[in-house]
Image (tube, coloured by chain):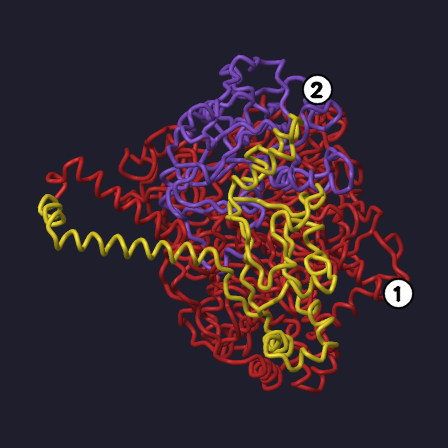
Chain colours: A purple, B red, C yellow
Amino acid sequence: MAIELKVSEVKMGEAYVGKWGMVIDQDMCTGCQACVAACAMENNLSFVGETDSGYGRSMHWIRIERFWEGSYPEVKMTPNQPMLCQQCGAATCEPVCPAFATVHSQAEQLNLQVYNRCVGTRYCANNCPYQVRSFNWRDYKRPEPLPNQLNPDVTVRRRGVMEKCTFCIQRIHKAQDKAKSEGREVVDGEFTTACAQACPASAITFGRVDNPDSLVSQLARVHGHGVKHLEELGTLPNVTYFKGG
Amino acid sequence: MSDKLSRRDFLKLAGVGAVTTAILTGCGPASRLVKREPYLQMPEYTYNGLSTYYATTCRECAAGCGLIIRTSQGRALKTEGNANNPLNLGKTCARGQATLQGLYNPNRVRGPIKHTRGERLYDTATDPFNDDFADAKSNMDWAAATQTVADALKNNKPEEIAFLMGMAPDHLFDLVTDLANATGIQSPVRFGALSMFESRATLSKASENLFGQTGLPLFDVGGAQVVFSFGANFLETWLSPVSYTRGFSALREAQTKQRGKFVQFESRMSSTAGKADEWMPLRPGTEAMVALAIGRLVSEIRGIPVPRAFSDIDPLDAASKSGIKLEMLNHLAEMFANSTGALAIPGGAALGQSNGLAVAEAVLALNAVVNNFGKPGGVFFSALAPNQTEYQGPASAKEVGEFVQKMIDGKIKVLFVHGVNPFFELPISLQFGGATKNIPQIISFATFPDETALEADYIFPDHHGLESWGYQRVATGSVGSVLSGAQPVVSPFYDTRATADVLIAAAQLAGGKFAAALPFKDEVEFLHSKVTPLINEADGFFSAPDVNTFMAYFQQFGGWWKTTDGRSIPNSADVLNRSLSSAEAEFAGEGEFFFVPFVSPTLAEAGANKPWLQELPDPTTTVMWNTWVEMNPVTAEELGLEDDDLVSITSEAGVLEVPVYRYPAIRPDTIAIPFGQGHTAYGRYAEKRGVNPTDLIGQNFNEAGDLAFAGMKVKIKKIGKKKPLSRLESIMGVYGVGLGEEK
Amino acid sequence: MIKRFFDWLKKPLGLIAVGITFLALFSLAAYGISLSQQPPAQPVQFPHRIHIGFGIQCLYCHPGAAKGPSAGIPAEARCWGCHNQIVKTQTSLLLKPLKDSVISGKPLQWVPVAQVPDFVQFNHRAHIAAGQNCENCHGDMSKMTVAENPQIFNMGFCLKCHTKVAGENHDLLVKLTDCGTCHY
């Protein structure tokens, strides 16, 4: 089968509109880690233990970055920055995968990680400017009875497989399936990702960016000064950040 | 061998190997080994593969947030907030999310155990991934267990029977209180490390002194324009963190109103202070002085005569002692005075000092200058819960100390412990451990094999919170009056039994006044007796024509609450006419460093046995799975210390060895250690990990009886060894600096 | 050493050894393949044929197929609803496991026949709603005694149908052949 390269179709900046998107208000984010825990519980993330997490092998699909500016006493903590897969429109991880395990979903406009195709070259993680991919360095065992809480809607990954945030695609499918069974479209706010649902500060909002009436689109318009990280690389990220302050 | 192996031979061998593998595994129907058990009788409204949702209450801390648990085929899968519950409105914190890792924790007490004090409850291997080692076996049945409790009740004088319980004002506390009132056994003592670190008793006492009423003040952060917080870490663990975080989010909301400002006064930048527009690293112990000075400046700016409360303070003096410049104090005072919604919050380490009560009063008085009491963005008294007539605070550390003294004096013959782990949560200096030696019988109702269960004679495990019935009064954080309801979302995983059921059954066995005190069939009947009177109350979230419907709604919605504003307005008439103390705190112990223990925002007092909470990076340092001591880089350089260097920290109460984390946002004369690790039991994920900073806290109290946990000075010595800390930031920032050898 | 081994293989004894090894592997493979073609042993020799013969619809026992992802194995209460009125249930040896299970309260342990790997998220509801009949994938149960799996549920099997159904509808084809539709 011929592979169609659609590089020429990728447009920079304004012209690109994705499907699912997120806005994150850094001024509201308190760094409480509720999203990180919610993500781990929803998506069957493995915990890796003290040693491996020290080597940077922890499997967070979302992490909260904070940086320091200045030195004491004029030191400032920069606004907490939840960092997750930006679901780029032109993702740098995709073209480097020799196994086509990280592909662009034309239907949902997401970056997919197909676990059964992944052979573990880790090229995608090396090429991701946001450093949001995590690799299963081992088969991290969950002692009994911890596996009882595994989410049946999400694949349990094994050793040698790359993984990353999916924008809770299982929830997208579930909502679409429910809507379809009731003969309607998915309503904005009907469902959301695990991180957005947990966030006590309501700093994360998820929805359709191609629908101008959705809450994400409205927030993006009202704020007006949203930032897309490393946009200059031409990755066309679908996550918008508000610095606030 | 490899040097003799030619490429050709290798390919041949590999070919044979590949074919064999393909034949042997490719066709093997390995997945056929799966077996599926259908239900014998499918529960109503259940379909295979579709989830069922149950409303219940989070038991990870005492706040009482409502949860919705997703279950499928009898297993709990995911925690979400209950959007109906007015306290958390559908939101959760990290600890609430991880509650399932407690339910399905590999180390739980699996049945009633007769136990020799000190005997291990599970194998000591600490490999978190190994599941070959087992918990101690249950060695008695529940009939014998109930008989044991009945004998303990019957064979001792009532005044020699005592209950030590967790902070949450829940149904079990009501049951034991009823039992105590009817039979003359000691009233239950409620305590938790969080109540100590939150300084709840100090807040309540200050309210009593200023407003003539005990209770927890409620600070309407969301409605304010300018928030000054003196040590209150309300975005982490303080009082009701989810509710206060919602308030903070509303404060920052900038579309429909002006973005609110937030200033935090504390010597170490907590993750709450990290969100502040201004962080004021004042010298520990000068909080009262600074608050009064700002109060004086505010009254001057507003052009009102300086009230008596602020008349004795000299702002210049306060500036020089606290280390905050006078211009800055003026700037802050202007900010406070010129705002239409200014709010000042006292809390946390600022109150855990010898002058804690004075700090609380001074900061509350600051609210009186702008008179925000009962106004949006101001100070209220928290709404009392539906079946509550007065504020019931947990015991202060001093009251616990008196309780320990009773134990030492041999006045307690039987001690029941539920929902609290005093061996871990109480500072060693309070001598709880030694005092238990004078108690003939200790019965623990611990769900997990914690340090206290390890020192008990019997362990009669209670269900996990998600397996139990109950209710919990919401002490603070909501506008209305809230009673969060709990119900089992899954059937009990082990041979555990609800403590309320055990007590009710034991009281029946004991007979006499005990049986009369608890005339119930079981826990659920007791719950109904407490909850169903609410059917007649007005303004409920729902109403029901009869008791059964009411209880069905109670379970369905996850509790009962009023739709009206239940907060009351503090009587502030006399606040500013009082003379308030501006004395500095006194610090116990020798040493050049102020010592600030703080509660780990992710672990808190009971999170260490949940592996994903261990793997959550600390919000400020990003350290996982361990304890560290925060030290200003300048101080570290002076002491010749680098990251991960072990130091020994000596206070008047004890010595600890901790690795250094050079933290840029802490005063050079202050060090800080998180509380949450340092378990000697409590399951494989918690044990032998980090240190417990309460070991350093001496027996010093403030005037309200709270422990002056932040009123210590300590010495630091370099040991010359390293303990590498796992941290998230190493891969994000300095690539290559990981654990150990890369450096 | 390897060289000596290959030399030995070329000698008569070696050739015989190769032959035996080959035969052993071949018969193992044949056995493996034949195993995968047989329906696995079930606790009850459930005759789908007879039940369908009585006119019982698939969805009567597997209602989950129309509601959600999993068709489900019926609860024993469902079996018992009819069988406790059938005299043969008391006497039949074949039905003894069901009787024992209901009386003892220990569920039967069925071995699922039609399975997809863990990394595939399959949803029955969508397929039924799209007008697919059960037998399109599961075969004609009215001809089967114990459930067999007539198809090997591999990706080719799924995609063949997905592309056919989509036909000229490009949007549907994109949706139905998207990796993320089944793998997440």
Instruction: Report helix, strand or loop for mark 2.
Output: helix
- The answer to whether mark 1 and mark 2 are in CB contact below 8 A is no
In three-dimensional space, the C-alpha distance between marks 1 and 2, rounded to whole angstroms, equals: 50 Å
Q: Amino acid at mark 2?
A: Arg
Q: If the image is split into quadrants, where does the N terminus of chain B sit?
A: top left
What is the number of the mark on residue A221?
A: 2
Percent x, y of residue B711: 49, 47
Q: Quadrant of residue B412?
A: bottom right
Instruction: Find residue A243 and report its image quarter.
Output: top right
Q: Residue B95 in the image: state x and y as whole percent.
A: 57, 49
- Which numbered circle lies on residue B260? none
Q: Callout 1, which amino acid?
A: Asp
Q: Residue at x 67, y 17 (%)?
A: A224
Judged left or right of residue C137, residue A234 is left
Most foreground residue, B267 or A43: A43
Could you tell me how many numbered marks the image carries?
Answer: 2
Residue A77 visible in image: yes
- Left or right of B688 on screen, residue C87: right
B737 shown above or below B183 = above
Badge 1 is on which residue? B546
Residue at the spot 50% in from the left edge and 23% down from the top edge: A91
- On screen, residue B34 above or below B604: below
State left or right for residue B219 relative to residue A76: right
Report if residue B298 is visible in the image: no
Identify the chain of the residue marked 2, using the numbered disc in the image.
Answer: A
Please state the chain letter of the residue tagged with numbered disc 1 in the rendered image: B
The image shows residue B45 at horizontal and vertical percentages of: 74, 58
Q: Quadrant of the C terminus of chain B?
A: top left
Mark 2 crowd level (few <14, some 14–19, many ≥20, 10 Å Cα): few
Mark 1: secondary structure: loop
Q: Nearer the viewer, residue B169 or B89?
A: B89
Residue B24: % across, % down: 35, 53
